[in-house]
Image: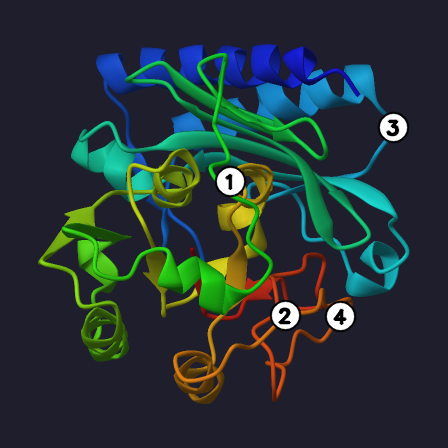
Amino acid sequence: MKIFYLINIAKQAGEEILNIYKNGFEIEFKDDKSPLTLADKKSHEIIVEGLEKISKFPILSEEGKEIPYDIRKNWEYYWCVDPLDGTKEFIKKNGEFTVNIALIHNGEPVLGVVYAPVTDIMYYAQKGKGAYKNGEKIEIKKSLKSLKERLNILKNKEELKIVASKSHMNDETKKFINELSQYLTPETLNLVSKGSSLKLCMVADGSADIYPRIAPTMEWDTAAADAIVREAGKMTYIYDEGIWSKVLDNNTQYPKSNTQDQTPNTKYPTPLIYNKENLLNPYFVVV
């Protein structure tokens, strides 16, 4: 699969989103009360049309039809799409929304494109070929095999940058940040707010150190950016309070999980997997 095809599709969708962004739009609400605009719909149409021209893989999109798990569970490859991640940011006109296209292989994101139309920033990655931002490869400074190593590299930094969402800054997230800062003891703790999948991309490109998401997300919210995170030498781990407390005390190695129920492992932090029955991500931390 040549990734430049996906880059072109994402840009086409982004151009249509920008046209609507500049010229005004009406807001609808889905059954779950989340907002929906013409930009969501048009982006979905452009992406689906583009993907159908380059592959026969099934497409799972936030704005597409619901596909029963009895059908999805047999998929080896499929596209996971969020045509407009950050609809609330789109409505607020703060520019922090993205187009997201991911290819999933047996539960793992192996290719991802994240495009921010307002800033014209393009992230992309393909398994085994690295992660890129606007055509420049994101440097992997060191190959780290354990979460403990990842956290230790952040210890005693002059400035620890934690990216999060102000709208999801709940008590659990505040508690996690407090415990983490006590362990890492940075001179300065800088909490950065950012919308949409850009938060994962900030950890991938090194402009943020860690992103805790102790609030609900769906698989299409993270899949494309998760592919970029992994190829940038980082990881998206399931968050479990008990396990993370142990990790801060013990040198714990993580194995790769292939269990579809994604129940938090009782011993190790495990990466997110995709194409679960309910499509809801468990809480996670990107580091």
Report x, y in % for residue 12.
Answer: 52, 11
Badge 2: residue crowd in 10 Å (few <14, some 14–19, many ≥20) = some
- SS type, badge 3: loop
Q: Are marks 4 and 1 in contact (CB under 8 Å)?
A: no
Badge number at residue 56 = 3
Residue topped by disc 2 = 254
Distance from Cα at disc 4 to Cα at disc 1 = 20 Å
Task: Judge left or right: residue 1 versus residue 42.
Answer: right
Mark nearer the N terminus (3 vs 2): 3
Report x, y in % for residue 39.
Answer: 41, 26
Residue shown at 66%/74% (left/top)?
Answer: 262
Residue 33 visible from this viewpoint: no
Q: Are marks 4 and 3 in contact (CB under 8 Å)?
A: no
- Give the mark toward the camera: 1 or 2: 2
Badge number at residue 260 = 4
Q: Are marks 3 and 2 in contact (CB under 8 Å)?
A: no
Badge number at residue 225 = 1
Q: Quadrant of residue 207?
A: top left
Mark nearer the N terminus (1 vs 2): 1
Q: Are marks 1 and 2 in contact (CB under 8 Å)?
A: no
